[in-house]
Amino acid sequence: MKFGTALQVLRVHGSRALLSAVVLAAIVAALTAALWRRDDVPAQTPAVVLRRGNGAEPESLDPHRARSEAALTILRDLYEGLTEIGPDGAPVLAAADRCVISADGITYRFHLRAQALWSNGEPVVAEDFAAAWRRLVEPRTGAQYAQLLAPVQGAEAITAGLAPASTLGVQALDPATLVVTLTRPTAYFLDLLAHPATFPINRSALAQHPLNFAKPGVMVSNGAFVLARWDFGSHLVAVRNHRYWNDAATQLGGVEYYSMTEPATELRAFRSGALDVTSTIPGAQFAWVKEHLGAQLHIAPQLGVYYLGLNLRRPPFARSPQLRRALSLVIDRERLVQAVTGTGESAAYTFVPPQTLNYSPPLPEYANWPMPRRIARARELLAEAGMLQSPPAIELRYNSGELHGRIAVAVAEMWKQALGVHTTLHAEEFKVLLQDIDRGDATQVFRASWLADYDDAYSFLQVLQSGFGINLPRYANADYDDLLARAANEVDAGRRRALLENAEQVMMADQPLIPLYFYVAKHLVSVRVRGWRDNAMNVVYSKQLLKDSSTPAMLPP
């Protein structure tokens, strides 16, 4: 057993170092997490390859330009941050083996593992993290996750273009010691550092190949696997990184990530034995899957929301909150999750999921109204906006996929029947959809989702903050921003929770987006695969998994 993986976090009080109850709980979780890296498991041949269905093709493997779950899943295998997500969703130390936190919660001192190496044999040093973080917040990088580091001293001024990246509160004290200074205590800071946007970057590779350092054959990474091949439109291949500090515990010789936009395609590949793990399952075939593949089916609550974004930069939504609210009112979410998704999802009337830690989302009053009353109120709102007699025509864009198409058709029909709104549906590749949303002039309504980066309401609400890179509707409200800023600086848990709940209430009254349902994680995992652990973050690292090729696949007739 390698107990060096334990979360050794010390909170320093005066001249004494004491362990808080929270930290003790984290250490217990981390000791449990150490079970991932077992030394008593027989070594397997390097030829054993895990084949993962990975949804849409990743848009980039540059840690600062990746934004989709498909890309982040791969990056978590290729790189390693200071922390990683444990089996229960809580953070455990990873590239760092010790962290000392000051008594006021402002200063974090990370000690890197002495044996940590890059895949090219260079040592992983503190400056690799410091340089990567400065690149993340540098406006010229264009990183949409730049505000993830908002708690770090100087980050907000840098991302706003008011200060140079060199002023960021991160310092490589020596090759093994990284010191981070925050502007305020941040309870979830260790959770943030498990996100790929905060991972280190090999500085020599970036300097030599600034435009393509994230490509196969060029990328230098510090995780359990290294990128070997990328066949666009098909799959990516990562091979075992024998220079990874804990390579002895890795049981796979490599991982193949298959890009399949259709869940039904993944299901067929799984049934044929061509996939070991799927990224999801098709809702239309859920009953069949449960009956025939139930022993391999994994369903678990997930901190994620599926929503429709409303482009606030162009008509008809820019100046009509009445229209935005009316469209939300008439969507029968219960019917969507029962008749369209059908795999355990729950109707969403808020942006933050109800199972989020220490939070109670403010449910709008209309959530409990019967549909006739909701439709009547929606028509009143349209009349107030002067649109009842001539409802606007709307275009809804979504990424290609059977489920997204069915949801779009259902929503368009609800809008048509209740309000007379005609909706043109437009399906396109995921990369194209992201480009259209970013341009802003090509979309009115668009399908989107948000999956939590950590188990805290702020992980959701920050997305709608003015200037946040992935604020897709481009929502801006000074009162909302103020409430979030006050919550970020509030140390009292009760007052912080109240501020966040108030902020969500303000935002949802403005209706910059329409939540439809909260996710559940849905996977098929072959009986050959061991070590899969469901969690609310829906993150399972390939290095935690074993694949027993001697066990026959369990395939239905």
Image (tube, helix red, strand yellow):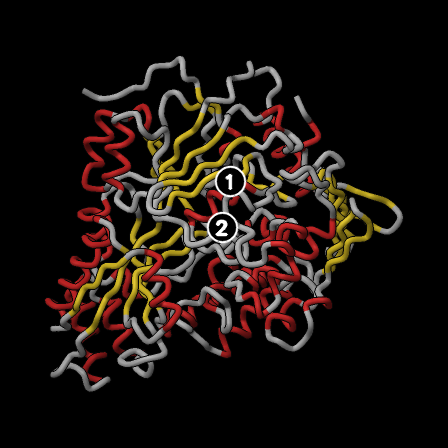
Q: Is residue 206 left or right of residue 278?
A: right
323 or 232, nearer to the observer: 232
Cβ atoms at labels 1 and 2 below 8 Å apart = yes
Viewer can see residue 142: yes
Q: Quadrant of the C terminus?
A: top left
Q: Looking at the image, which is closer to me, 290 or 137?
A: 137
For marks 1 and 2, give the one nearer the viewer.
Answer: 1
Label 2 sits on what residue type?
A: Leu
Disc number placed over residue 61 in the picture, else none: 2
In the image, residue 217 sits, relative to residue 169, either above or below, namely above
Q: Residue at x 37, y 74 (%)?
A: 510
In this rendering, position of residue 425 left or right of residue 343:
left
Few, some or many C-alpha atoms within 10 Å of disc 2 (few <14, some 14-19, many ≥20)?
many
Residue at point 21% right, 48% down?
402
Q: In the rendering, at what x and y percent does residue 509 appear?
A: 37, 72
| Amino acid type for the residue under numbered disc 1 | Leu
Q: CA distance from mark 1 to mark 2?
A: 10 Å
Indicate left or right for 45 with 17 as reference. left
Residue most toward the bottom? Answer: 386
Q: Secondary structure at mark 1?
A: strand
- From the image, tell me which residue sits under label 1: 227
The x and y percentages for residue 311 are 33, 73
Question: Residue drawn 35% across and 51% down?
Answer: 518
- Judge left or right: residue 288 versus residue 145: left
